[in-house]
Amino acid sequence: MSTVDPIAERLIERLGGERPGDSVDWIAALRSRAAERLAALGLPHTKIEDWKYTSLKPITKRDFARPDAASATADAGAVEALRIPGLETHRLVFVNGHFAAALSDRDLGAQGLTVKSLAAAFAEDPEALRDRFAALAPIDFSGFTALNTAYADDGAVIRVAPKTQVERPIELVFLSTPQGQPVMAQPRVILDAGHHSEVTLIEHFVGLDDAANLTNAVTELKIDVGAQVTHYRLQRESRKGFHIASIHAEQAENSRYASHNVQIGGQLSRTDINTALNAEGADTLFNGIYLLNGRQHSDTHTRINHLAPHTYSEESYRGILNDHARGVFNGRVYVAQNAQQIQAYQQNDNLLLSGRAEIDTKPELEIYADDVVCSHGATIGRLDDNMLFYLRSRGVDEEAARGLLLYAFAEGTVEKMGLEALRTWLEGFVIDELPQAERVREFV
Amino acid sequence: MTDWVDVAHRDEIAHKEYRVVDVDDVEVVVFNLDGEFYALEDVCTHDGAELSGGHVEDECIVCPRHGAKFSIRSGEALTPPAYEATETFPVRVTEDGTVQVRDPRWD
C-alpha cells in the first residue's frame, strides 16, 4: 500500500484543477501519473543526501496558491525596462507562470524556428510533444519535477530545424508578481535543437514588488548531432521569493551545450542542472556564479554524465557570500565504464566576506572507465591580503581595492559569456551586488 | 526592524522546558530557566539539524542526535561534536506575561 505524503496531499488539494492538454488522453494520463508520484515522493527534505544542506521548511510551511491566469499581466513599462540593452531577442513574457501574449513579441518565428507557448503547443499539435514532454525530466527526479509535470500551467516549446542558425537569442522572461496571496508558478520549457543547428536561450526570472511567490521551473533540452545550444539562466527573484528549478539536457554526437547560470535573487533557491553526453564528441560547459547576501540561501547541484568515449566537460562555478548567506554547491561527474578517453574538469571557488556566511561545496567524481582525464577543485577563502596590499601600494584605498578584487573574481565567470550586450548588462548587476558598488563604478 | 513574536504565556513554559516558534522563517527554541527566558536558534551547529527534541540538562540543551551540549544562556557549544555556538535571540516578557522573541539580525 502506498502512503501519501501530507505536504504533497496539501499541494495536490490546492493546485488541482483543469490544465492545458487535459482533453488529450496521453497528457491527462501523464499528469495523473505525475500527481501520484508526487503523492508518493513528497517534497525533498534534509534526510535525503542531495538535499542535506537545504531545508525546505520555509516553502513547505506556506500554502502557495495556483496563480490566476486572468491576472497574468504586468505593467508594460516595467516589463520593457527589463530588456537587455543592445540585445535583439525573440521575447516571450510569462507572468506567474502564465504566458502573457500582450507583453511578448508578436513575430516569434523565424526561418527554421518555431516558438510557441506550451498551452498553444498542446492545443495545436499535442502529438508532436508525446515523446518530448517529461522525456528528459523524469517525474521520479524529485517531487518538484513531478509537481511541475502534473501542474504546469504554461511554458514554451521551441523547435529549431536542422542546420538552422538562429541569430537572435530566444528570451523567456518569467515575472513573479504579488497576487493577493503567494502563488506557485510552474513554467515548463521544452527545446529541440535539430542537427547542426545553433540557438541561444535566455531564461530570465525576475521578482517584482517583493513578490513572495515560488517558481518551480523545469527545462528540457534535446540537442541533436552537431547542434550548439547556449543557455543563459538569470535568476533575479525578489528577496522574499523562492526559486526551484531543474534543467535536463541530452546531447548527441558532436553537440555542444554551454550553460551560464547566474544566481542573484531569492530568499531560498535550488537549481539542478543535468546533462547526458550520450555520444562521441559531445561537449559541455557549465559556467555559473552565485552572489548572496543578507540571509539568502542558494543551492546548486550539477550532474554531468559522460556516457560515451571522447566526450569533454568543463565546469566552473564561483560564489561570493556576505552577511549570513549560505551557499551550497554539489558538482557530480559520472563517467561510465565505456566512456574512455573523456576529459572532465571541475572547479568551484568561493569568497566568504563575513564570518557568518557559509558555503558547503562538494565535488563528486564517480569514474568507472580507466583511461580518462578528470580533475576537480574547491576553494573557500577570503580576499587575499597580498592582492589588497598590492592595490593599496598603488594608491587605491582599501574599500575600492576590496571592491575591485571582488569584481575581478566575478568577472572570471562573466567573461566566459559570449553575448557581449548581455555581458555588459550583467556586469552592472554584479557590481550592484558588491558591498563597495559605488567605489567599483569609479574604476570600471 | 523585525517585530516581536509571541511564544506563549510565561506560565505555559515550565522550568527547564522549551517551546519552538517560527520567527520570520527562523526556527527558535525559547527556554525557561528558573523564570528567566532564553532563546537559541533551533540548529545544532554540528549537523545543521534541530536541537528541539533534545532534553535540558543543568543549563544546557543536549542535541537529540549526537549529544552535543549547548549553553542555553549563551548558545556556546560546550561539548563535541559541536564546536561553534548557535545563534541567540533577545527575549522579553510583556506586562501581561507574554513571552516574546525577535530576530534582530536583519534590522
Image (spheres, rainbow, N blue to C red):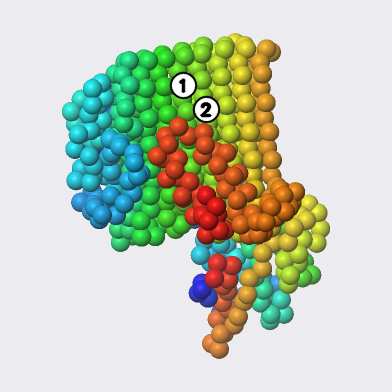
Residue at image location 46% in from the left, 50% down from the top: A429
Q: How many marks?
A: 2
Mark 1 residue crowding within 10 angstroms, few (<14) / some (14–19) / many (20+)? many
Task: Kindly indicate whether the residue at mark 1 contacts the one at mark 2 (C-beta within 8 angstroms).
Answer: yes
Label 2, label 1: how far apart the Cα atoms are: 8 Å
Q: Nearer the viewer, residue B5 or A154?
A: A154
Q: Indicate the position of residue A119 as horizontal and vertical percent values.
A: 23, 36
The label number, if any, that marks residue A256 in the structure image: 1
Same chain for mark 2 and mark 1? The answer is: yes
Mark 2 residue crowding within 10 angstroms, few (<14) / some (14–19) / many (20+)? many
Residue A25 vertical position relative to residue A388 in the rendered view, above or below: above
Q: Indicate the position of residue A174 as horizontal and vertical percent values.
A: 34, 45
Residue at image location 53% in from the left, 31% down from the top: A286
Quickly name the residue at label 2: A285
Label 2 element class:
strand
Q: Is residue A96 left or right of residue A343?
A: left
Subunit under mark 1: A
Q: Which of A68 and A349 is in front in this view?
A: A349
Amino acid type indicated by mark 2:
Leu
Q: Which of marks 2 and 1 is nearer the N terminus?
A: 1
Q: In this view, does A418 lie to the left or right of B37?
A: left
Residue A27 seen: yes
Q: Indicate the position of residue A351 as horizontal and vertical percent values.
A: 65, 48
Q: Is residue A200 left or right of residue A59?
A: left
Amino acid type indicated by mark 1:
Arg
